[in-house]
Image: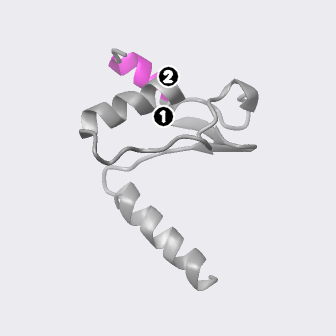
Amino acid sequence: MKLNTQMLEQMKSVDIGAVDKETLADASGFTFDPTLPKETRALRMLEQFKNPYCFRYGDMVIKLEFSEEGPSLQDLLTTFFLRQKSGL
């Protein structure tokens, strides 16, 4: 899948409040294979999700947004799961 800047901007600009969740890819069955190179994993995610910025997990719609100055996604998820585990 070849992406250009315009396509990425369209993906990022999806309005989560207006999108029909049934049109979004369901990520609930998606698994990452850590043995594959990063590029191959990213390509597989793009092929399945179609839009890596907006998708659903079951009935929950998820939209990812990133900041150049912010923490990495890995750091955010690690913090989130540690808080969940501790009951916060």
Residue sitting at 59 percent across and 29 percent down?
A: 14
Residue in front for this viewpoint, 15 or 48: 48
Against 25, is 63 above or below?
below
- 63 is within the stretch colored magenta: no
Secondary element at tag 1: loop
The stretch drawn in magenta includes residue 7: yes
- Residue that numbered label 2 is attached to: 10
> Residue at label 1?
52
Q: Residues within 10 Å of mark 2 (few under 14, many from 20)?
A: few
Whether pointer 2 and pointer 1 mark residues with C-beta atoms closer than 8 Å, the reply is: no
Residue 27, percent from left and from top: 59, 40
What x and y, as percent, mark residue 55?
60, 36
Amino acid on which the number 2 mark rests in the picture: Gln
Crowd rating for badge 1 (residues with CA inside 10 Å; few <14, some 14–19, many 20+): some
- Residues rendered magenta in the picture: 4-11
- Residue closest to the eye, 54 or 86: 86
Give the answer, above or below, for where 49 lies relative to 76. above
Q: Earlier in the sequence, mark 2 or mark 1?
A: 2
Residue 75, relative to residue 8: is it above or below? below
Residue at 40% x, 17% y: name it.
Answer: 6
**Residue 52 rendering spot, x and y as whole percentages:** 48, 34
Q: What kind of residue is marked 1? A: Pro
In the picture, measured across the screen, residue 9 lies left or right of residue 14, that is: left
Numbered disc 2: secondary structure: helix
Residue 69 falls in image quadrant: bottom left
Q: Which mark is residue 33?
A: none
66 left or right of 84?
A: left
Mark 2 and mark 1: span between their CA atoms?
Answer: 11 Å
